[in-house]
Each structure stands twice: as C-alpha cells, then as structure tokens.
Amino acid sequence: MSAATRTPEAEGLDLVLVGSFNPAIFHPEWLFRQGIITEQDAKEANVQNVSSEITVLQMGGIRLQCISHQFSLLTTNISHAERMQDLIRQTFSLLSHTPISACGINPHVHYSVGNIDYWHKIGHELAPKEPVWNELLEHPGMQSLTIKAPRGGDYPGEINATVEPSVKHPPGIFVKVNCHYGLPSEIMHAGAAERALKFIEAEWKPACGMARKVAEQIFTKIKPDHD
C-alpha cells in the first residue's frame, strides 16, 4: 500500500493560545449572546465546569478548555477544523485586547500499519538501536521520538513533530505536530490577539495537514519488507 492510499484511522486537532484569560466568561450563553454560536448550540452544549479557575465545555465535536494562562479548542474529528477556526476568529476578534504570548496549531493522526514486523521496522528506522541501545537494554523499543525544526516566513516559530506507537490502533503509529508561534513581547498587551489571528489565518491549512504529511513521509521512505 502506497503512502498516498493509506487512510488515517483517526485525525484530530488542538488549537492553543497562551496568555492571560478569564475562564468564567466562556459560558455557552455568553458565546450565544455575542453571536459566536447559535441558540441551539448553546442549549445542546455540555457544560462540565465554568468558574474563575477553569472552564470546560463540549459543543458538538469541539471541546473548549480555559484556565488563567491557556485557552484551547480540541477535537478528535478533523472535519470540525473549519468550525474551530471560526470559533477562535470570532471569539478573539471580540476579545481583541486579550494579552497573548504564543499560539499553536497542533494536528494529530493515527495510522494502522497492519503488520507487526513493519511496525517494528518503522521504529528501528526512526530510532536505531545500534550502536547504543542494544548493548544497554534488552529488547529496546521506540516509545516517543520528537524532531524540532525552525519555521520561517511572516510568522517565524518552530515545528515539533512527534512519532509514537498508536495505543488506539495497534500495531500503528501516532503522529502529532506542534506548529508554534511565539508573539513578539512588545505587542503582548497591544495587538497580540490580532497578530495571533493573522497567524492562524495564514498558517491554518498547511499546519492542519502537517501530521498527515509527516506520516506519509514515513510510509514513503520506510517500506514494508513484503507488501
């Protein structure tokens, strides 16, 4: 099976802002009154907690979490990505004076490899056991590998790509990518939300596809011994 024909077993996304937030305001009723979600969405939202310390609520397939220094939207279904982008855009266009110091677009994907020998081969190729590990440990195996690289362009930052065994779809691989952008400190209290939204708008599509792109590169470069 070629990399192009492999279909993920699951694909999701996290969108994270780091800064200074007021968790208590993010109630479904407030989101509805501001025109961010519909009345039906507000009625159907699963509110787990709303307080000055932490807010956790589920709206459709999107989970909103907020503590004093972090706001995040999370989904295990990539089909909700466009809605997540709309939610973050509408919310922080309204809360335009929110201090924000960093932003991350973080896709993740699970692939089944269907063959335990191929699964081991991927781990051995990504994290060779020679010349170090086989002499130190008995049956060493790759648990987690992270590769970090700078990201240039108009919103320079870094990319952190992590590959692990998939616990949900064994034998398989789990790939998660953190597309990180640290905002200039001088704009944290003046224009940071606007800059973060511009980063999200510009980098959304390539960032959302990065986990799949990493996995496809692995499958392209590391072939099973027998298809």
Image (cartoon, helix red, strand yellow):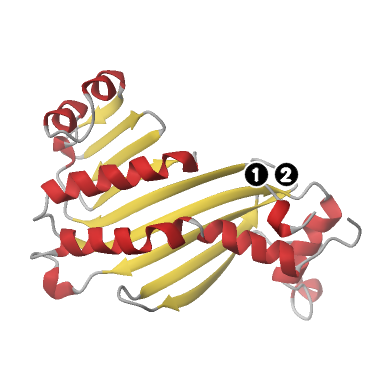
Name the amino acid, label 1: Val
Asked whether the viewer can see residue 81, the reply is yes
Asked if residue 102 lies left or right of residue 80, the reply is left
Measured from the top left, where is residue 16 in percent x and y?
33, 53
Which of the 4 image quarters holds residue 191?
A: bottom left
In the rendered structure, the answer to whether residue 201 lies left or right of residue 146 reads left
Residue occupied by mark 2: 170
Q: Residue furthest bottom?
A: 131
Q: How many numbered circles are shown? A: 2
Give whichever of 225, 164 is nearer the camera.
225
- Looking at numbered disc 2 in the image, what kind of residue is underneath it? Pro
Q: x and y percent of residue 48 in the render?
A: 31, 26
**SS at badge 1:** loop
Q: Secondary structure at mark 2?
A: loop
Q: Residue at x 20, y 40 (%)?
A: 53
Tag of residue 167: 1
Residue at the (45%, 69%) spot, across then down: 159
User: Does the residue at mark 2 contact the one at mark 1 (Cβ under 8 Å)?
Assistant: yes
Question: Is 222 drawn above or below residue 105 in the view shown?
Answer: below
Please determine whether, in this image, residue 76 is positioned above or below residue 45: below
Is residue 140 visible to us here?
Answer: no
Quadrant of the image occupied by residue 224:
bottom right
Horizontal placement of 168 versus 23: left or right? right
Whole-percent x and y of residue 58?
34, 30
Q: Residue at x 88, y 55 (%)?
A: 227
Q: Quadrant of the N terminus?
A: bottom right
In the image, farthest residue toward the right: 226
Q: Residue at x 23, y 26 (%)?
A: 38
194 over 166 or under it: above or below = below
